[in-house]
Structures are given as C-alpha cells and as structure tokens.
C-alpha cells in the first residue's frame, strides 16, 4: 500500500511532464520536425496592414497603413535583423534594427543615419513580429520547454484545442491554442497589464522549405484587429549574407536627451513646461487658475510638480485637448478629476467622452470654432488641419511667441533636427498660414526648443521617398 501511494503521489508530476512533452512533440512534427528544429536561420517576409485605431486623422474613419517587414533570425550566430517599410498618411519610413552578435544598431535608411543602441538585443529585436508568426513561436517554445505548462483543452473555432503556456523574454507569458487533430497553432494570447488580452490568430497555413507557417495572421487588441498579415513567406537557411551589413556612409543621428526624471521648466512668468518619459504638458497661470495643454497619462503628477516648483496652488480649470489620439487623451480622466473643462473641437467631443465611465455634461466642454482665447488672451488656440489630424488645436503663447504642439514638430535629440515627414510638412503649411510671430516650438514628446527657422530647414525640399537606397524590401 505504501509503495502504491508513493507511485500515486509521484505520478501527477511525471505525467504532467509527459503530457507537455507529448504535445510539444506533436507541435514540432506539425511544423516540420527537424527542418524547423535544426534550421540555422529563418527569413520571414511579412506584408502587413496596420489599422490605426485611436490614431487616425479623423475620429470617424480609421486609417489603414502598409507595413512590409523582413525579419532574419540567425540562430547559429545569434544575430538578428528586422527591417520595416511603412507607408501611411505620415509619409514613407524605412528603418532597420540589427544585432550582429555583439552590438545593436538602429538604422534609418531615409535619413541615412546609423547608431549603436544597447537596447537592441538578440532577444529583443522583432519580438512583435515573432509573436505574429506561429513558426517562430514554436522556436520560442523549444527554448523554454522546461517551463511550459499544459492547460485545459478548449473549443476554439468549433474545434478542440490543447493549450500550453510558456515564457518569452521581454513579454508576459504566452498561451498557445493547438488544434488537437493537426497540431497547428490556431491562436496565441498574452495578457497586457493595461489593455488586457492580446490575441494572435493564425490561418491559411502553408509549407515552404519543409517548414509550416501561417500565411495570414492577425493581431487583436481588446478584440479589435490592429495588424493584419495578409501574406508572408518563410524560408529556411536562405542567403542572409547581406542582411547584417551596416550601411556605408551613414552618419550618427546622435544621442537623446534623458527624460527619465520629472522636469519642470518655467518658460516665462507663469508659463510652465513639465513632464518625463516622453509625456509633457504646458501649464499657464491664468490668475486664479491654471490652463493646461498636453494630455498624456500622469497629468496629475506633472501638475503637482509644477505647483510644487512654483509654490503656486491654484486649480486646473481648462484642459486644452490638442487632438483625439488615444495616447494624447490618456490623461483626460485625471483632468476631469482635477475639475478641468475640456477645450476641444466638436469633432473630437465624442472620443473624449469615451474616456469616462459616464458621459460628462455638455457644459464641461468648451468648443473652439476656428480660433479661441483663454486666460485673458495669454493663450490662443487655432484649429488647424494636418496630415496627422484633420482637426488639431495649436496652442500659442503670444507673450513669448511659443507654440506647444504634439506629434508634429519636436525633438529629444541632443542636436540636429528631427527627420521630416508629411505630418511636419503639412504642419508647417498650416502654421505659416496663421502668420504668427513664432519664436519657439516645444512638444508634448520633445523637450528641446526649436525655432521657425528650424521648421523651415527641416522641411525644405521634402519629398516622400519612393524607396530609400533602392532596398529590396521596397523596390518591388
Ligand atoms: Zn497624434
């Protein structure tokens, strides 16, 4: 009896390990067996569409962009290259991240810049692209199989699926849904602490070079598709001899200003600029209250930092909403709690209302029709139109000729000007049409003050690049 109960006690652990091994064996077989496990490299070309939920020019029409990506994973030499060609309303963009086995590099082929970047590692580069491909998930699973745990079987798409959860460097745990009959991965999920469940759906499986992969996949955030892979190819041990070449003749873009600490700057009497980590606001002392612009999350922390640094304690009465994008209205619940009204355009009101569990009364909104003025004329707002946003509230402080703006013209580069794009060019046109006396630009993301001359220099002669350097990713 004693021996029997001993066996019974040990059995679940041993069986659990066997259960995982059996499932992993089935998955590996479905994905090509040795062809995948012994692949020295994988070359993945994705043709994607990006669905700009919460980031479109209009609040009533979702923009769709083109993204073509080439991910090369050199397992043998622990090298990685991830090249991305993006075409959207902001222009064309061609960027590459390389880890050459020793160092990481960030390359901008349009601007012809190349910089060493310690954050670009073998594990980190292309993590998102690896998650949108079932075949790479199998390689991640094999690297972490000792920590893989079987879950319950579930029905998905009306078919029985086995589930398995395992870790991935730099990500919350991944759970895959494996078709019980075919051994193919139909879906992967992981939990994001802020937006909830992220889903990756794999369909249209194909085989090439002996390896199976989903010809299509979709990435969904909170149930909404945000990236669709409409076509892809996966090749095993292809010629990758040129993928890790660092381009010749590129300059360094240079270092970035460190914004990890809360910064409070008094730009002029009663005009404060505050923030950290790429989220900044401007606060203007309007006598018995403050007016703010710049709506990133952590608005309260920035406001508290301004009040502490200035020794001025007044309420926030007006929050200017530059535009309706999800990141720039992330702090609106905080503004509401601080008691502020919202200065916006009629077109963005419903998007802002969506930030609150219950719609706010209409008198909390102050709608700008073309031009507006606050704090006895200390601040002016202008409804302009750019490629980035059909309606955009430009914030201008006449006393110092300062424009505070988001997503158009700002930088955290220690020196030099930001790379131009269509957003910046259309911003310049709209700003010039206002004929304001502008001495400086400061941003919701970028802390270095720039000038009108800088805006002209950066955008003069801008042309949307057809395909920088004639690179393979965009030359067909
Ligand atoms: Zn934006």
Image (cartoon, grey):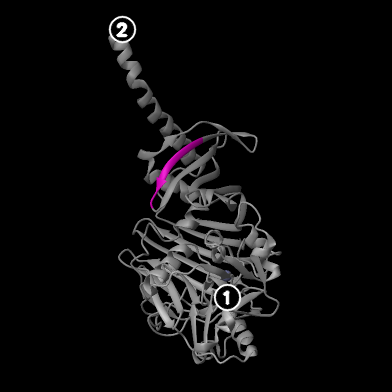
- Residue located 28% across and 11% down the image: 3
Return the residue at label 1: 92
Q: Residues within 10 Å of mark 1 (few under 14, many from 20)?
A: many
| Farthest residue, direction top | 1
Return the residue at label 2: 1
Find numbered disc 2 in the image and state the secondary structure of the residue it sits on. Answer: loop
Q: Is residue 321 magenta?
A: no
For the question of whether residue 150 can be seen, the reply is yes
Q: Position of residue 283 (x, y in %)?
A: 49, 74
Q: Give the left or right position of residue 392, taking residue 212 as reference.
A: right
- Towards the viewer: 247 or 449: 449
Q: Which residues are magenta?
A: 163-169
Q: Residues within 10 Å of mark 2 (few under 14, many from 20)?
A: few
Q: Give the left or right position of residue 425, taking residue 131 as reference.
A: right
Question: Whole-Å distance between the Cαs marked 2 and 1?
Answer: 73 Å
Find numbered disc 1 in the image and state the secondary structure of the residue it sits on. Answer: strand
For the question of whether residue 243 can be seen, the reply is no
- Towards the viewer: 178 or 418: 418
Mark 2, ligand 1, within 8 Å: the answer is no
């Amino acid at each position: 009896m004693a021996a029997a109960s001993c066996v019974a006690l040990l059995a679940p652990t041993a069986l659990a390990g066997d259960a995982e091994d059996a499932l992993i064996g089935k998955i590996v077989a479905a994905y090509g067996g040795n062809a995948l496990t012994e692949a020295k490299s994988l070359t993945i070309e994705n043709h994607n569409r990006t669905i700009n939920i919460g980031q479109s020019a209009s609040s009533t029409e979702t923009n769709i962009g083109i993204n073509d990506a080439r991910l090369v994973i050199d397992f043998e030499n622990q090298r990685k290259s991830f090249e991305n060609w993006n075409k959207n309303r902001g222009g064309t963009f061609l960027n590459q991240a390389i880890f050459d086995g020793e160092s990481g590099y960030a390359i901008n082929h349009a601007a012809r810049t190349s910089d060493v970047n310690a954050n670009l590692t073998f594990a980190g580069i292309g993590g998102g692209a690896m998650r949108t491909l079932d075949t790479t998930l199998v390689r991640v699973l094999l690297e972490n199989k000792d920590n893989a745990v079987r879950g319950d079987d579930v029905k998905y798409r009306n078919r029985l699926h086995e589930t398995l959860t395992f870790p991935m460097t730099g990500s919350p745990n991944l759970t895959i849904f494996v078709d019980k009959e075919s051994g193919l991965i139909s879906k992967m999920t992981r939990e994001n602490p802020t937006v909830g469940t992220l889903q990756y759906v794999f369909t249209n499986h194909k085989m090439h070079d002996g390896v199976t992969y989903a010809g299509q996949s979709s990435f969904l955030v909170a149930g909404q598709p945000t990236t669709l892979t409409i076509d892809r190819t996966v090749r095993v041990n292809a010629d990758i001899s040129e993928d890790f070449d660092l381009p010749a003749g590129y300059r360094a873009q240079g270092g970035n200003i460190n914004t990890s600490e809360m910064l409070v700057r008094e730009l002029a009497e009663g005009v404060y600029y505050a923030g950290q980590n790429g989220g900044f606001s401007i606060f203007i002392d309007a006598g018995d209250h403050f007016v703010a612009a710049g709506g990133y999350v952590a608005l309260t922390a920035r406001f508290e930092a301004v009040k502490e640094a200035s020794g001025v304690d007044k309420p926030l009465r007006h929050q200017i909403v530059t535009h309706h994008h999800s990141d720039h209205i992330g702090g609106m619940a905080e503004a509401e709690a601080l008691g502020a009204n919202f200065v916006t355009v009629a077109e963005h009101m419903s998007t802002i209302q969506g930030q609150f569990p219950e719609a706010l009364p209409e008198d909390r909104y102050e709608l700008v029709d073309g031009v507006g003025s606050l704090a006895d004329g200390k601040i002016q707002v202008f409804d302009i139109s750019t490629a980035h946003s059909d309606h955009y509230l430009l914030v201008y402080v006449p006393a110092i000729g300062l424009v505070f703006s988001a997503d158009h013209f700002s930088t955290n580069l220690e020196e030099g000007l930001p790379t131009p794009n269509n957003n910046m060019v259309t911003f310049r046109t709209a700003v010039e049409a206002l004929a304001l006396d502008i001495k400086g630009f400061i941003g919701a993301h970028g802390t270095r003050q720039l000038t009108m001359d800088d805006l002209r220099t950066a955008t003069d002669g801008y042309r949307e690049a057809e395909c920088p350097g004639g690179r393979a990713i965009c030359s067909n």
